[in-house]
Image (cartoon, helix red, strand yellow):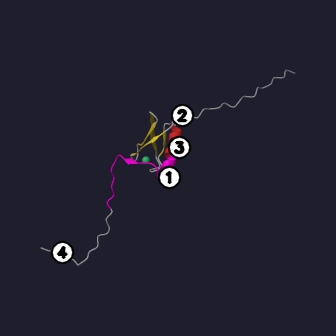
Amino acid sequence: MGGKRKKRTKPIRVRPKVPSTFECPRCGKVSINIKIKNGMANITCGACGLHAEIEVPPVFDNANAYGKFLDMYLEGEIEISDEENNQKEEEENYEDEGKSEELHQ
Ligand SMILES: [Zn+2]
């Protein structure tokens, strides 16, 4: 009997790639870009223009920085600056006091 033993194949561990883009907590799109430089993580959303900078320890990679950013964002501890200045104009407090001053000419 030629006992051919099959070697158990070890499950190959695939190292999860560190994603380069992350989900934006504000607009929900996966377009957050993170660049780490000199202990500062530069976080930008390509979709809604959200931009933030946070301090990170040197051991942090993008995913770590994103985690910290999320925490801080949710806690409201982060300074978010918009690249686009989309100011909504909602002025519905426009009541007509003193009836129609319509100039009909
Ligand atoms: Zn966004």
For this orientation, the residue located farthest to the bottom is 99
Principal secondary structure, stretch drawn in magenta: loop
Marking on residue 9? none
Quarter that holds the N terminus: top right
Question: Which-is-in-front pick, marks 1 and 4?
Answer: 1
69 or 10: which is nearer to us?
69
Marking on residue 59? 2
* Marked residue nearer the N-terminal end (2 or 4): 2
Label 3 crowd (10 A; few <14 / some 14-19 / many >=20): some
Marking on residue 102? 4
The residue drawn where x is 18% and y is 74% is 102
The residue drawn where x is 69% and y is 31% is 11
Mark 4 and mark 3: Cα distance apart in space: 58 Å
Residue 71 on the magenta span: yes
SS assignment at label 4:
loop
Name the residue that disc number 3 marks.
67
Q: Which residues are magenta?
A: 70-89
Expressed as whole percent of the image width and height from the top left, the position of residue 100 reads 21, 77
* Residue type at the position of mark 2: Val
Name the residue that disc number 1 marks.
75
* Residue type at the position of mark 4: Glu
